[in-house]
Amino acid sequence: MAPIPSDIASVQTLPQLLAYRAARTPDAPAYRAFDSTAQAWSSLSWSETSRRVEQWALALAAMQLPQAARVAILLPNGLNAMCADQSTLATGAVPVPLHAIDNPGSIAYILADCEASMLIVGQAEQWAKVQAVGTPFPALRAVVIADDDASAIAALPSVEDGPIVGSLAQWLAGAQHVATPAVVTPPAEDDLAAIVYTSGTTGKPKGVMLTHRNVVSDVKAVLERIAPTVDDVFLSFLPLSHTFERTGGYYLPIAAGSCVAYSRSVALLGEDLKTVRPTVLVSVPRIYERIHGKLLEKLSLTPWKMQLYEAAQHKGWTQFCAAQSLPAPAADDGKAAGWMAALPWPLLHMLVAKPLLAQFGGRVRVAVSGGAPLSPTIAKCFLGLGLPLVQGYGMTETAPVVSVNSLDDNDPACVGKALPGVEVRIGDNRELQVRGPIVMKGYWKRPEDTARILGNDGWLGTGDQADIVGGRIYIKGRIKEIIVTSTGEKVPPGDLELALLADPLLEQAFAVGENRPFIACVAVLNAGEWQRLAADLGLSAQDADSLNHPSVHRAVLARIEKNTASFARYAVPRAVHCTLEPWTIENTFMTPTLKLKRTNLMAHFAQAIDGMYQKPGGR
């Protein structure tokens, strides 16, 4: 048995990280999950976690897979997903986390591309759908199904020379009958700790090869910046297939000894926040946007409540800026609050801030936002009302965190300073470049793609334009996505789309204008808000033609202009096309990490986009 590291600095691999934690605080709570049978939350200590992982590792070792075999994991967040990952790592194999909400064709492509030897999947139905794609999997030896539904497993079509298919219970029990446990070679720090496939907004997903050195280095660096403790409780709801959750919401708590509670589902997240009462949140901006949208939806029905909210946000934001030595808000910034701006903060806190913070459980001491840019409107709302929100930046290729603000140095306009041990610089075309132990080994079986992004000197091109001022990194937008109008103006669509979504009327937005005379946008309207707007305009909300009635366009563009007041005039959309059909992963308009598939959207809305430019632009 390998020696257990005596301190975090000595940890070099992820199995060592778990061993270190289990030895240091064996009886402390490690994980909490909801037991649907008992209808109650149950807990595991670190020592119990270690023993459970050992049981899984015995079963995996008994498979006698090739060294560094790829084990694909298609499971929802929970104890099974954690055990699958940890046992794979412990036996020197390589986890390939899959998005549970990805489509079967994409999953089949990844299984074939990574040459997976084994798949651990939630339900028999998921495997049946992947099988139905018809992709051959010559390397796949076994499929383990976590749901022990014997009839569903028995109903699966048998495939000649296909993998052995069985339940998780059978697989774990089988290891108990092995006379001599297989000898496994634990991983070294330069061995692979994962192959994580990027979503791919265009083309096929690429497998990012992350080593133990990459991930452990990132965990240690984030530990210095965010500093969670053994008293902290994380609530896990981002998919474990997302690198941001893997590092920030899974491996980081192991390093810190914090407890992780697994949310039952995104649908039940609101309830789980109040039950678990987390102290640390790791989330993408979409979660904060949804809460903000629902808040404004409720407040907009009662003008005096909206005024009270504006007063609390403005006063709180002013205090935040002063505490962080940021420029004070403009004098007329709080005019929407009217006379309520004069109310004292303790009263505003009690009436507005406290109820909002209670939605998060009431004891969050740090909320990290990453994975996508955070809208200034959202940051101002939550920071102003007292949620300690810090924004970070990273990419799958950097394991993933490159930078993050800290609670005492928090400018929400930037993504913080580079983590300890990470170098950043600005290259050609203002591209942010990164170097350090967090940078990936390369793309799986794609040396040409690796060479395009990673230089021999170790510098990785992020594809993002940025400025670095006083060490702080300010992201300007994706180089490939920047819209260049026919008048030569350059508009990063990401920032613009974030500003548009500050309006509860707009659920989703997609900016266009490449080689066109002005910027326009396609917008998915919120069904409830659309009903109200249609009624105000004397239109039938049920009539499809009403959506793009001239009066609707004028009303939507007026709201857009209000939310883009800080943008250059040329960046403000001058035409809009409205729809009610959401863009989802299933209809191929979103990636599994909820990024817009711009090429697909452009093709689908080609006629509508052309129509916007055939009408007179501008107002």
Image (cartoon, rainbow, N blue to C red):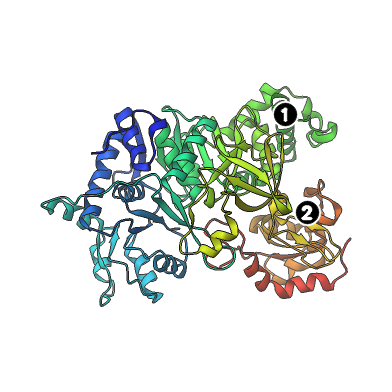
Alpha carbon separation for disc pair 1 and 2:
26 Å
Quick one: label 2, few (<14), some, or many (20+) residues within 10 Å? Answer: many
103 relative to 236, above or below: below
Tag 2 secondary structure: helix
Q: Mark 1 is on which residue type?
A: Cys
Q: Earlier in the sequence, mark 1 or mark 2?
A: 1
Where does the C terminus fall, quadrant-wise?
bottom right
> In the shown orientation, is residue 53 left or right of residue 320?
left
Where does the N terminus fall, quadrant-wise?
top left
89 relative to 422, above or below: below
**In the rendering, which numbered label is found on residue 321?**
1
Which residue is found at the position 72% from the left and 29% from the top?
321
* Image x and y of residue 279, in percent: 49, 32
Tag 1 secondary structure: helix
> In the shown orientation, is residue 434 left or right of residue 179?
right
Note whether residue 41 is visible: no
Q: Mark 2 is on which residue type?
A: Ile
The quadrant in which residue 414 appears is: top right
* Image x and y of residue 313, in percent: 71, 33
Which residue is found at the position 74% from the left and 57% from the top?
533
Q: Which numbered disc, 1 or 2, marks the residue closer to the eye?
A: 1
Q: Which residue is mark 2?
A: 560
